Amino acid sequence: MEKIKIEAEVNAPVSKVWEYWTAPEHIVNWNFASDDWCCPSASNDLKAGGKYSARMEAKDGSFGFDFTAVYDKVVQNSLIQYTMEDGRVALTDFEDLGDSTKVTTHFDAEDQNPVEMQQQGWQAILNNFKTYIEKN
């Protein structure tokens, strides 16, 4: 299975990045790839064996889906690994750079969409996260 990598350096300390990445009240504000999408709800049981769920919808109501996963490993302020419903795995590292944090995610590609499209979509969500946290 092909792995895809996305990354961004976020101008915030790792503790804030971790909080905004994992807290549902923040997730709903950044977890979408473009302005015509939204994330109306999210829940997060942040521990090994815990479940993550986020509702993603087109704002015009034309399409929506639930993104769900189960955590395999959680190391606070450092690493999150989860397995999606279809068996694919994603691993996100949070590298403490002092005043900033490097966020890197590696995830298994799915076979429904081109790899480049998947990389661009996930990168757009990460970029949206970066913009959100740096404004708040």
Image: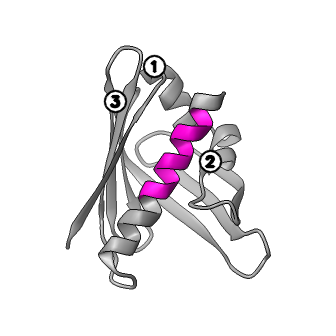
Residue 133: image location, x then y, percent = 58, 32
Say few, some or many: other residues with alpha carbon within 10 Å of mark 3 (under 14 / 14 to 19 / 20 or more).
some
Residue 118: image location, x then y, percent = 39, 70
Image position of 30 with respect to 119: above or below: above
- Helix, strand or loop at disc 1? loop
Front disc: 3 or 2: 2
Q: Can residue 22 be seen in this view?
A: no
Residue 16: image location, x then y, percent = 53, 23
Q: Looking at the rendered structure, which numbered label has been put on residue 30?
A: 2
Q: Where does label 3 land, which residue?
A: 78
Q: Looking at the rendered structure, which numbered label has been put on residue 13?
A: 1
For this view, does 21 lie left or right of residue 71? right
Which residue of the protein is positioned furthest toward the right in this rendering? Answer: 60
For this view, does 93 lie left or right of residue 129? left
Quarter containing the C terminus:
top right
Front disc: 3 or 1: 1
Residue 97: image location, x then y, percent = 32, 20
Instruction: Say which quarter of the image contains residue 129.
Output: top right
